[in-house]
């Protein structure tokens, strides 16, 4: 197949990372892939795709027989890079390192959950990663590390350095790539009970209601205080993450794009 992706911005983002991963996975299966963009040349990772630079995506005309990938196909088929996957459960840190990712409004629930757990004497390092620098309103006093706009290799190293993930999301948020990367990396995950999270499975994480920092904090306490539970969640998460390996997603994409 001849396939084209339309990408408005080539900066580091979940969308860009997924597009690049899908393109490379399809190329590995001998498809011809172009990425059409109004952005600048890529600098933060390599890509096997052919790049087409345009002034306006609305003016792009595909070649005869070329399939233009729908944005929903991109969103619904994330790929976790193979480097995230770990075959053995790594040794835990002391104190435990809790990862809080994202830039959505729901990030406040993540901070609230961490504060709730600390109020009940849980000791851990809070590791924050965001697409951008913190705002004046973000409560960074309780953060031990704050990372901004990490590339793929930097993100892999950071996730692998952590033990637990807090994933606060709103009901209508798309599936978080970071959550999937954390599962592949064998982190014990505490997530909100959104349709996207529940669609994965029901036994790979602890779930709290959306928009409820206290309940999310209670689940975090449960994970932090129970090593046996953490080990079970880490193994279960790693198992469900197999569905987002590049080779498995590429097979699904082939079927979708050939319809």
Image: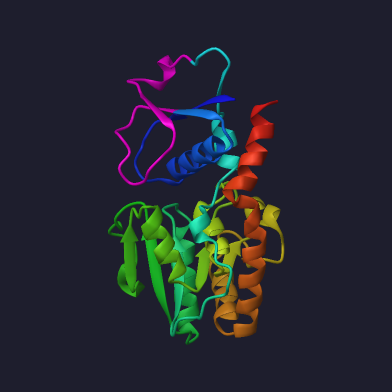
Q: What residue span does the magenta drawing correspond to?
A: 35-61
Q: Residue at x 64, y 29 (%)?
A: 257
Magenta span has 47? yes
Instruction: Residue at 60% x, 79% y: name it.
Output: 222
Residue 56 rendering spot, x and y as whole percentages: 36, 20
Tell me: 136 left or right of 29.
left
Q: Is residue 15 visible?
A: yes
Query: From where the camera sits, is residue 168 visible?
Result: no
Q: Main secondary structure of the magenta part?
A: loop
Is 12 situated above or below 37? below
The structure's colour scheme is rainbow
Residue 26: where, in percent of width, then height? Answer: 56, 36
Q: Quadrant of the C terminus?
A: top right
Q: Which residue reaches farthest bottom? A: 121
Give the tally of numbered discs.
Answer: 0
Of residues 117 and 200, the one nearer the viewer is 200
To which quarter of the image does residue 16 belong?
A: top left
Quadrant containing the N terminus in the rendered view: top right
Name the residue: 43% across, 17% down. 60
Q: Is residue 99 left or right of residue 66?
A: left
Image position, residue 209 (x, y; %): 62, 62
Where in the figure is residue 146, as x and y percent of width and height?
32, 65
């Amino acid at each position: 197949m001849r396939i084209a992706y339309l990408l408005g911005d080539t900066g580091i983002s979940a969308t860009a990372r997924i597009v690049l991963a899908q393109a490379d996975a399809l190329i590995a299966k001998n498809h011809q892939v172009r990425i059409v963009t109004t952005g600048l040349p890529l600098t933060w990772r390599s890509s096997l795709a052919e790049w087409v630079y345009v002034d306006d995506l609305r003016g792009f005309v595909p070649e005869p027989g070329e399939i233009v990938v729908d944005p929903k196909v991109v969103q619904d088929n994330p790929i976790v890079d193979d480097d995230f996957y770990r075959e053995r459960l790594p040794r835990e840190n002391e104190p435990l390192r809790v990862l809080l990712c994202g830039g959505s409004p729901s990030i406040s629930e993540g901070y609230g959950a961490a504060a709730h757990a600390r109020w009940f004497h849980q000791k851990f390092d809070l590791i924050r990663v965001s697409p951008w620098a913190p705002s004046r309103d973000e409560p960074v006093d309780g953060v031990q590390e704050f990372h901004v706009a990490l590339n793929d290799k930097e993100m892999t190293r950071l996730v692998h350095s952590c033990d637990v993930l807090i994933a606060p999301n709103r009901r209508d948020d798309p599936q978080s790539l970071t959550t999937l990367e954390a599962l592949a990396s064998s982190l014990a995950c505490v997530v909100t009970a959104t349709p996207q999270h529940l669609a994965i499975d029901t036994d790979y994480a602890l779930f709290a209601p959306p928009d409820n920092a206290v309940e999310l904090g209670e689940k975090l306490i449960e994970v932090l205080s129970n090593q046996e539970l953490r080990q079970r969640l880490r193994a279960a998460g790693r198992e469900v993450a197999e569905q987002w390996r590049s080779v498995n997603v590429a097979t699904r994409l082939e079927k979708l794009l050939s319809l």
